[in-house]
């Protein structure tokens, strides 16, 4: 049978003291404050990082390229054109019809050798008439001379007047002048007749024949499309013309040696020597025309050949620094001058004016303004300026922040 004390109520729990409540409140407030401070600090740090990242991304990223130093003695390679040492287009001095020609293209001829003969019937008749007129005038001269001598004898005998004697002497002088004029006219026609024989003006090769038997020949250069008969060229020596960029003008002087190659003889160089320059810069191309002489006694080269010419260029200590080679993409053109952007101290841009030597297509030669130790910016932005801060892209494709 249960006892009564089993149903007695439990005693109430002890109530916390006021001190304990104050301590718990302080701890809760401290924790809350710490959470607030940590949150604020986190937001400030994130904002700072965002601003730093944004500022960094606003700095242009550039890549660098190292200049390649050129040797002191440079091989300057330029195109050139070969021309005959002498070249003469042969025109007719007299009209007529081509009677016969003796030499075709490629024939070697000597000075004075007959090339062709022109049939000149009109000129022949003029010459016959002029000679007949001269004979008539000479007959008058003989009669005038006899008359003048006779009247001079009669004057000594006072058989004729002095006036009449002077008239006869004047007639002799007039007919003598007519004879001289007639002889000159005949000589002129004979000289023209000599031009009916077309001869070579010098030793050379017939490079063109532009006429044939029976062609109507008109006198003078440019008289008609058929007025030029032959072309004769001296090819034992050839002239080589090359347009050299102005920047090399101080080093291109008579005596400079060169070699040339032509497409029909790949790998075979032909020596050449520079003999003169135009001493003037073309206002169209900015180049100086130079002339070289090439020995061609073996006849391997042809007038009109395109040639690749290699000059043995001496170094130029006065050029303002060693020549270097860079990609063409480094150049900046603003106005009339060419510039290159170089990375200076503290990743700041330094703009340097340069002098461009040879344009080699995908690369260029800088003859003055740079040194091999410069750190050149490749493909610089159009807006790049002096002193601008940039970031350098490393080889792996990233970019480091400016120092």
Image (cartoon, rainbow, N blue to C red):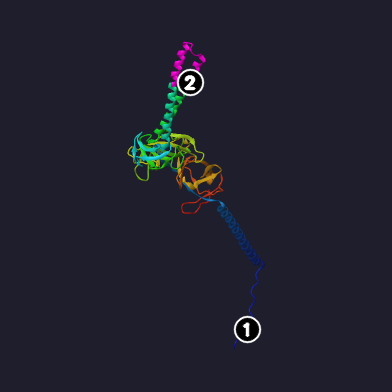
Quick check: is 358 in the magenta stretch?
A: no
Q: Position of residue 312 (x, y in %)?
A: 39, 38
Which residue does the numbered mark 1 point to in the structure image? Answer: 7
Q: Crowding near pointer 1: few (<14 within 10 Å), some, many (20+)?
A: few
Q: Is residue 3 above or below residue 119?
A: below
Residue 51 visible in the shown view: yes
In the displayed image of the protein, which residue is found farthest to the front? 159
Q: Crowding near pointer 2: few (<14 within 10 Å), some, many (20+)?
A: some
Q: Is residue 12 above or below residue 53?
A: below
SS label for mark 1:
helix
**Residue drawn at point x = 56 percent, y = 52 percent:** 56
Quadrant location, the N terminus: bottom right
Q: Position of residue 110 (x, y in %)?
A: 34, 35
Q: Quadrant of residue 92?
A: top left
Quick check: is 166 in the magenta stretch?
A: yes
- Name the foreground residue: 145 vs 298: 145
Q: Position of residue 169 (x, y in %)?
A: 48, 18
| Residue at mark 1 to residue at mark 2: CA–CA distance | 192 Å
SS label for mark 2:
helix
**Residue drawn at point x = 42 percent, y = 34 percent:** 125
- Name the foreground residue: 43 vs 203: 203
Q: Quadrant of residue 207?
A: top left
Q: Which residues are magenta?
A: 143-167
Q: Position of residue 140 (x, y in %)?
A: 44, 23
């Amino acid at each position: 049978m249960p006892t009564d004390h089993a149903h007695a109520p439990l005693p109430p729990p002890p109530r916390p003291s006021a001190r304990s409540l104050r301590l718990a409140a302080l701890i809760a407030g401290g924790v809350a404050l710490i959470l607030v401070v940590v949150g604020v600090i986190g937001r400030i740090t994130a904002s700072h990082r965002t601003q730093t990242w944004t500022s960094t991304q606003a700095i242009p990223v550039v890549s660098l390229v190292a200049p390649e130093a050129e040797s002191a003695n440079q091989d300057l390679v330029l195109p050139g054109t070969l021309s005959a040492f002498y070249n003469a287009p042969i025109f007719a001095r007299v009209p007529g019809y081509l009677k016969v020609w003796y030499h075709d293209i490629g024939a070697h001829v000597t000075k004075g050798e007959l090339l062709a003969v022109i049939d000149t019937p009109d000129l022949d008749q003029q010459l016959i008439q002029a000679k007949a007129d001269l004979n008539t005038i000479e007959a008058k001269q003989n009669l005038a001379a006899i008359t003048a001598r006779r009247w001079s004898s009669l004057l000594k005998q006072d058989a004729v007047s002095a006036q009449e004697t002077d008239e006869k002497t004047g007639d002799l002088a007039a007919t003598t002048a007519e004879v001289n004029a007639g002889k000159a006219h005949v000589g002129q026609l004979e000289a023209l007749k000599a031009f009916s024989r077309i001869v070579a003006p010098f030793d050379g090769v017939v490079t063109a024949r532009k006429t044939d038997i029976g062609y109507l020949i008109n006198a003078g250069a440019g008289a008609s499309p058929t007025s030029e008969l032959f072309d004769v060229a001296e090819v034992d020596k050839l002239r080589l013309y090359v347009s050299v960029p102005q920047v090399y003008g101080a080093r291109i002087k008579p005596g400079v040696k060169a070699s040339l190659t032509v497409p029909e003889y790949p790998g075979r160089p032909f020596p050449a020597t520079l003999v003169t320059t135009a001493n003037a810069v073309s206002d169209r191309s900015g180049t100086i025309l130079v002339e070289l002489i090439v020995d061609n006694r073996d006849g391997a080269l042809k007038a009109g050949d395109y040639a690749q010419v290699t000059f043995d260029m001496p170094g130029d200590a006065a050029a303002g620094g060693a020549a270097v080679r860079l990609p063409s993409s480094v150049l900046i053109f603003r106005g009339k001058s060419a510039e290159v952007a170089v990375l200076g101290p503290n990743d700041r841009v330094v703009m340097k004016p340069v002098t461009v030597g040879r344009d080699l297509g995908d690369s260029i030669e800088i003859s003055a303004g740079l040194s091999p130790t410069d750190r050149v910016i490749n493909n610089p932005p159009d807006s790049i300026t002096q002193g601008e801060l940039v970031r350098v892209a490393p080889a792996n494709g990233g970019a480091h922040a400016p120092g």
